[in-house]
Amino acid sequence: MSGARGSVRHYLRVGAPAERIWPLIGDPTRLTEWFPGITDCRVEGSQRTITTATGLTMVEALLTNDPLAHRFQYRITSDLVHEHLSTIDVLDLGDGTSVVQYSCDADPAPLALMIAGGALDGLRTLQQLVEEE
């Protein structure tokens, strides 16, 4: 991290092909199933409103949802955030496994650390969900 902007990336190898992982990531309403601390999620058009376990509500702009590239991007549009972009990529390795990568860029920098910390737990939950199927 440098200055006010922070950038964090996490990735995890998952024992499943992208086709099994993508439905959980590509459906923006399913966030509560794998991202810790998110208790409610509503989608209207290209906008998602999430509610955290602490009761905080945040609005997100859904920017990219590409089922061919297995890429999902969103931006938090709350007044508390100067700038934010999170990207989730599912990279199929062709051997029945995939790498799921979650990257977060944000200003203020501590926000990137907070979101990416939750995202790492989310990736582990995602891994458990698809490997148990």
Image (tube, grey):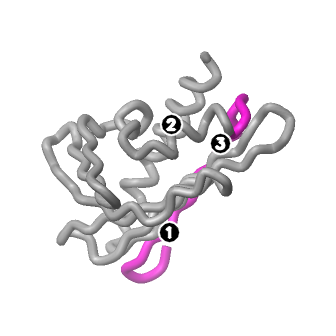
Q: Is residue 74 left or right of residue 68?
A: left
Q: Residue at x 60, y 26 (%)?
A: 130
Give residue 109's position: percent from left, percent from top: 38, 70
Q: Amino acid at mark 1?
A: Ser
Q: Which residue is mark 1?
A: 7
Q: Earlier in the sequence, mark 2 or mark 3?
A: 3
Give residue 9's position: percent from left, percent from top: 57, 59
Q: Residue at x 65, y 42 (%)?
A: 12
Crowd band around label 3 with a 10 angstrom C-alpha radius: few (<14), some (14–19), many (20+): some
Q: Amino acid at mark 3?
A: Leu
Q: Secondary structure at mark 2?
A: helix
Picture layout, residue 133 above or below residue 115: above
Query: What is the C-alpha distance between the residues marked 2 and 1?
Result: 24 Å
- Bounds of the magenta span? 1-18
Query: What is the C-alpha distance between the residues marked 1 and 3?
Result: 17 Å
Q: Which residue is mark 3?
A: 12
Q: What number is the disc on residue 24?
A: 2
Q: Earlier in the sequence, mark 1 or mark 3?
A: 1
Q: Secondary structure at mark 3?
A: strand
Of badges 2 and 1, nearer the viewer stands 2
